[in-house]
Image: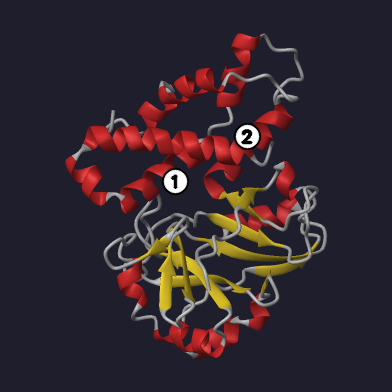
Amino acid sequence: MQYRKYTHIERLGRDEVEGILNGTVYISPKIDGTNSVLYLDDQGNLTAGSRKRVLTLIDDNAGFAAHAQHEDGVKAYLARHPHYYVYGEWLIKNQINWYQADAWHKFYIFDVYDDNQQCYLKPEEYEQELRDLGATVIPQMAVLTNPTMEQLEELVKTNKYLIDEHVDQIGEGIVLKNYEFINRFGRHCYGKIVASEFLKRKYVPRKIKNDTYEHADVEEKALSLLTNEMLIKEFARLKNEQPSLYANKPAAFNGMLLQTIWHTFISEEITRIDKKLKSPRIDLNVLKHLVFDFDKVRTTFPNQF
């Protein structure tokens, strides 16, 4: 089989996941590592991937390809189901550093995709078999029908999965999966709530006035959708993927970081920008300069710039 990128998870409140809470919703802890996948290639060899690419021992991502050779449970599972992709989180230090001491550098499975049926399996279809083989599967916190925001807030606040019992902290957030959900754009996707954002704003979605903006102001309004979470995530991912560049060539790393932030911002937010600003006429060159000169980028990473 060929490399398959994992489904993007959208923040609850965005148009892409409007309606995801209608029906049966599986809710699991979100952990702060790096998205990874294991599968068998066309020759039957165990293959590791990151969020965006195939990994090798020479071109690895934070050591996951090297670790994959020791995932005996997943290897046995894929031998039984060679048409499956096993997705999980390779737990390395990013923003959250208060996980249990023995939790790091392990593979935590959160999804299995059936390439024959072209769909994700429900947890009850894969969890027990994987656990019986010795693999680690992220547990479900709850399975709710038409969950309320009050129920979700309680789950966010009580997410202690893998958290060191000696610290007064909670996990990164929760992931919401409705396996029957198809959004208004005809796509299946998942939702998420990030604790640091959700509890701070009590789930009051960001609102932008329905004004007629002057052209010079449009790019500034678009820039307001670039979040701290996105900045921190892209920094952590790039640092893990380019450790030598980070350590030895900080100026080059910073340039790549800005390019990465720009690429992710446009590729993941352009639809939201279009809808929130009512199909604005945006000068992408101006917006790019604003992103590169954005004070938030420099204040978020004061030691970098």
Q: Position of residue 91 (x, y in %)?
A: 39, 64
Q: Which quadrant does the C terminus fall into?
A: top left
Q: Viewed as shown, does residue 100 lie left or right of 115?
A: left
Q: Which residue is mark 2?
A: 270
Q: Viewed as shown, does residue 177 lie left or right of 233?
A: right
Toward the left, the furthest residue is 248
Kind of residue at disc 1? Lys
Q: Which residue is mark 1?
A: 233
Callout 2 crowding tier (Cα within 10 Å): few <14, some 14–19, many ≥20: some
Q: Residue at x 35, y 60 (%)?
A: 92
Q: Viewed as shown, does residue 61 lie left or right of 123?
A: left
Q: Position of residue 292 (x, y in %)?
A: 42, 25
Q: How many marks?
A: 2
**Closer to the camera, 96 or 78?**
78
Task: Answer yes or no: is residue 228 visible.
Answer: no
Q: Nearer the viewer, mark 1 or mark 2?
A: 2
Task: Answer yes or no: is residue 137 visible.
Answer: yes
287 w.r.t. 90: above or below: above
213 w.r.t. 41: above or below: above
Toward the front, the furthest residue is 43
Callout 1 crowding tier (Cα within 10 Å): few <14, some 14–19, many ≥20: some
Q: Residue at x 24, y 44 (%)?
A: 245
Q: Position of residue 135 (x, y in %)?
A: 46, 82
Marks 1/2: CA distance?
18 Å
Kind of residue at disc 2? Ile
